[in-house]
């Protein structure tokens, strides 16, 4: 996964001066245009570093030792990396790659206040995406702490506000829609890692055995067989929550995201983390795994 470190930035500066020297050797070349492009590339990496520093300062307002806060900090940076990986695989230009990283950095900013107030991720306690968008783009314009340039405010706000919607609807601008889709994919992609690394107690309040003892609710299973995400209100048992985490992978926008998931064998590994007590539950989980992986492979094969 590509990350820009101090060596990368030094290389960009070096390349800039090589380009300048090259164009100066020929008066017919568009020196100003090339220099502007190089400056823009360097500014984009500076902008993300500044946003990251401001985000770290914001996190100092919360208890980093809290398990849920820690989970969301790690998840945030995981989403940043996932967004960059997907964007580069898609061949997006550098401006869109850096925008995707900034949106990834800020997408869950509302979660920290939700945890502080309610010690919960449950949507019934707070609509964290809407709250995060209001926090950033409300009267106080907190977004200016992280992004000085206001040209992308509408794009960033919409992508953050809609990243956890059950279905992505109502966006007509192509570039905003691109980033709204990208952050949703990056969020789900890092959630694969979360579901493998975090303790079940942090995720669901019980151990893996407790998760596997439940019965899958009929409405939950209907959604799975329809290749749809599961409505929060349809979940009854802990195993319903677990299966809903897997069913959400039907709602992936880009085949590049599925490629990454297949490379890491995420679906099978997540499925296998829980011992399912009832044979019927195990059979259904096996069927869902086979059906979802078939769907993922179809999407990858049909990639344009």
Image (cartoon, rainbow, N blue to C red):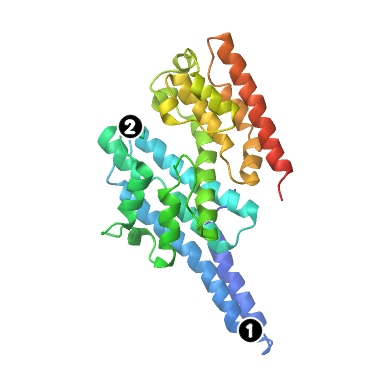
Q: Where is residue 140 in the image (x, y as percent from the top left)?
A: 26, 59
Q: Is residue 18 above or below residue 145?
A: below
Q: Position of residue 304 (x, y in %)?
A: 71, 51
In percent of the image, x 34 and y 45: which residue is there? Answer: 110
Between residues 272 and 48, which one lies in front from this camera angle?
272
Label 1 CA crowd tier, 10 Å (few <14, some 14–19, many 20+): few
In percent of the image, x 62 and y 15: which residue is there? Answer: 283
Label 2 CA crowd tier, 10 Å (few <14, some 14–19, many 20+): some
- The secondary structure type at the circle numbered 2 is loop
**Residue 53 numbered mark, or none:** none
Total marks in image: 2
Q: Is residue 13 above or below residue 26?
A: above
Q: Where is residue 144 in the image (x, y as percent from the top left)?
A: 34, 62
Q: List the residue tagged with mark 1.
A: 30
Give the side of residue 246 with respect to residue 129, left or right: right
In percent of the image, x 57 and y 23: which residue is there? Answer: 271
Between label 1 and label 2, give the one nearer the viewer: 2
In percent of the image, x 49 and y 33: which residue is there? Answer: 194
Between residues 262 and 279, which one lies in front from this camera angle?
279
Give the side of residue 199 with respect to residue 54, left or right: right
| Among numbered discs 1 and 2, the one appearing first in the sequence | 1
Q: List the residue tagged with mark 2.
A: 120
- The secondary structure type at the circle numbered 1 is loop
Check the image and name the residue furthest to the bottom: 27
Q: How far apart are marks 1 and 2 (CA)?
A: 56 Å
Q: Position of residue 131 (x, y in %)?
A: 32, 46
Q: In this view, does 51 lie above or below 244?
A: below
Give the side of residue 279 with respect to residue 75, left or right: right
User: Which corner quadrant of the image does residue 249 belong to?
Assistant: top right
Badge 1 vs badge 2, beta-carbon distance below 8 Å: no
């Amino acid at each position: 996964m590509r990350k820009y470190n101090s060596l990368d930035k030094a290389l960009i500066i070096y390349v800039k001066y090589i380009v300048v020297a090259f164009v100066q050797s020929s008066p017919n070349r568009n020196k100003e245009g090339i220099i502007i492009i190089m400056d823009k590339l360097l500014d984009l990496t500076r902008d993300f570093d500044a946003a990251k520093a401001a985000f770290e300062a914001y996190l100092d307002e919360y208890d980093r030792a809290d398990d849920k806060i820690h989970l969301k900090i790690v998840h945030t940076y995981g989403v940043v990396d996932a967004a960059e990986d997907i964007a580069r695989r898609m061949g997006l230009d550098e401006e869109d790659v850096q925008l995707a990283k900034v949106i990834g950095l800020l997408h869950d900013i509302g979660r920290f206040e939700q945890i502080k107030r309610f010690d919960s991720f449950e949507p019934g306690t707070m609509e964290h995406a809407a709250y995060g968008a209001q926090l950033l783009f409300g009267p106080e314009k907190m977004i200016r702490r992280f992004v000085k340039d206001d040209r992308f405010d509408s794009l960033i706000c919409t992508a953050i506000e809609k990243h956890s919607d059950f279905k992505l609807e109502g966006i007509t601008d192509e570039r905003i829609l691109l980033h709204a889709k990208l952050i949703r994919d990056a969020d789900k992609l890092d959630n694969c890692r979360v579901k493998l690394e975090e303790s079940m107690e942090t995720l669901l309040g019980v151990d893996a055995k407790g998760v596997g003892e439940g019965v899958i609710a009929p409405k939950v299973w209907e959604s799975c067989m329809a290749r749809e995400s599961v409505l929060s209100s349809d979940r009854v048992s802990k195993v319903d929550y677990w299966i809903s985490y897997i069913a959400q992978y039907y709602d992936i926008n880009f085949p590049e995201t599925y490629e990454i998931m297949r490379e890491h064998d995420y679906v099978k590994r997540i499925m296998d983390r829980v011992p399912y007590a009832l044979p019927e539950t195990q059979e259904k989980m096996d069927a869902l795994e086979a059906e979802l992986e078939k769907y993922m492979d179809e999407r990858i094969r049909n990639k344009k």
